[in-house]
Amino acid sequence: MSKVYDFKGNIKDNELEEIKNIINKGGVVVFPTETVYGIGADAKNKEAVEKIFIAKGRPQDNPLIVHISNYDMLKEFTCNISEIEKTLMDKFWPGPFTIILNSNGTLPLNVTAGLNTVGVRMPDNNIALSIIEKSNTPIAAPSANISGRPSGTNINDIFDELNNKVNAFVDGGETNIGIESTVVKVDKSVINILRPGKVSLEDIKALGFDVKLDKHVFADVKEGEKIESPGMKHKHYAPSVKTILLEYTEDESVMINTLKKYVKNNSDKNIGILCFDEHKELLKEYNVINIGSVNNVLEISSNIYTKLRSIENFDCDEWIIEGVSRTGIGTAIMNRLTRACSYNILK
Ligand code: TXA
Ligand code: MG
């Protein structure tokens, strides 16, 4: 069994030393960040990084995010950072923000999947920062889940799927934000959002920058199409049961009526509904699980992956998920749900 370190109350110095030793000897550790749990290894150690790909069953062409705890680490493996990139890092680090920078070519090829760029993030989580700082090396870490599955936001959700595949789990309780960081790439003076997150398009615009959502944030990649991020073409965040995303409308009766009509027209199926807290009572004759308040999208983001995992334990044929408004962090929630539902959208 993989070792579990309980850092929920506080970081224990002697155990942090053990975790540092695991990382420095080329081991793999699951650890919390403010977004989701990461499965991390020394970014400078090719064999250690290879173990992450094996544990996750991750496609080799999908590069990893490199996590740092200070700006000196950044200089070790990046080059030609622009003023705009500096401003963005200053503004959003530490935080749920990943920026694609020019790589100086020193990292092992499997970290960047052979690209000449590298995704970097300074997380806003004391446990993550302490592990990186103590290990004194940048840590490459994708989300902690088997590739294609919903990301892990607590140890309980991912223990079984990663047990014995990693050296240790560091338990920091539930992650705060619940969905992965915003990934951006600066293209001349335009900031292109490759993956939306808690740092929203509106947040970046408020700094006075030109910013856009990459066209693949909400559209599937077609055969032969050029993509900005390898992760865009892979299946993601999906539970093992069929799911359908219900488009948000401000008028709740429209959502409720669409739901009821769909269930009625599919009476041969046993359908479950992941709904807003406010709709639970209105839908009480159906199989429902609530996902948080429609007025508190942050609550929905922090719950969503656990809820997507929990529906696997019911014997429904399919689940409908109530979508949120595509603004602020709602854009990120809808990006994950669109993919989790394999672009099956109910309007
Ligand atoms: O919040 C997060 O970002 C979490 C925590 C653990 O930090 N990490 C995470 O990693 O979500 P992962 O591997 O699940 O997602 C990384 C995404 C992928 O879509 C990948 O394709 C993209 O970032 N990416 C990484 N390096 C890239 C690069 N050089 N160019 C374009 N996309 C890149
Ligand atoms: Mg992931």
Image: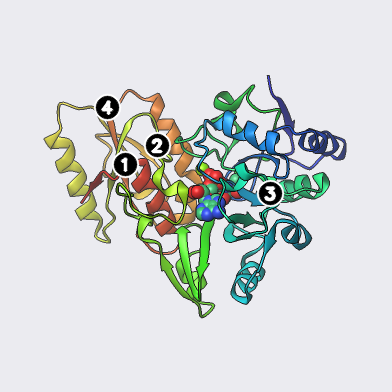
Name the N-terminal-most of marks 1 and 4: 4
Mark 2 closeness class: few <14, some 14–19, many ≥20 residues within 10 Å? many
Q: Are marks 3 and 1 in contact (CB under 8 Å)?
A: no
Q: Which residue is mark 1?
A: 342
Numbered marks: total? 4
| 143 up-or-down from 71: above or below | above
Q: Are marks 4 and 3 in contact (CB under 8 Å)?
A: no
Mark 1 closeness class: few <14, some 14–19, many ≥20 residues within 10 Å? some
- State the image quarter where residue 81 is shown: bottom right
| 128 up-or-down from 97: above or below | above
Local secondary structure at mark 1: loop
Q: Which residue is mark 4?
A: 317
**In which quadrant of the rendered image does the N terminus lie?**
top right
Q: Which residue is mark 3?
A: 107
Q: Are marks 1 and 2 in contact (CB under 8 Å)?
A: yes
Residue type at the position of mark 3: Leu
Q: Nearer the viewer, mark 2 or mark 4?
A: 2
In the shown orientation, is residue 55 left or right of residue 259? Answer: right
Q: Nearer the viewer, mark 3 or mark 1?
A: 3
Local secondary structure at mark 2: loop
Q: Which residue is mark 2?
A: 238
Residue type at the position of mark 2: Ala
Mark 4 closeness class: few <14, some 14–19, many ≥20 residues within 10 Å? few
- Name which residue lies at 62% across and 44% down: 109
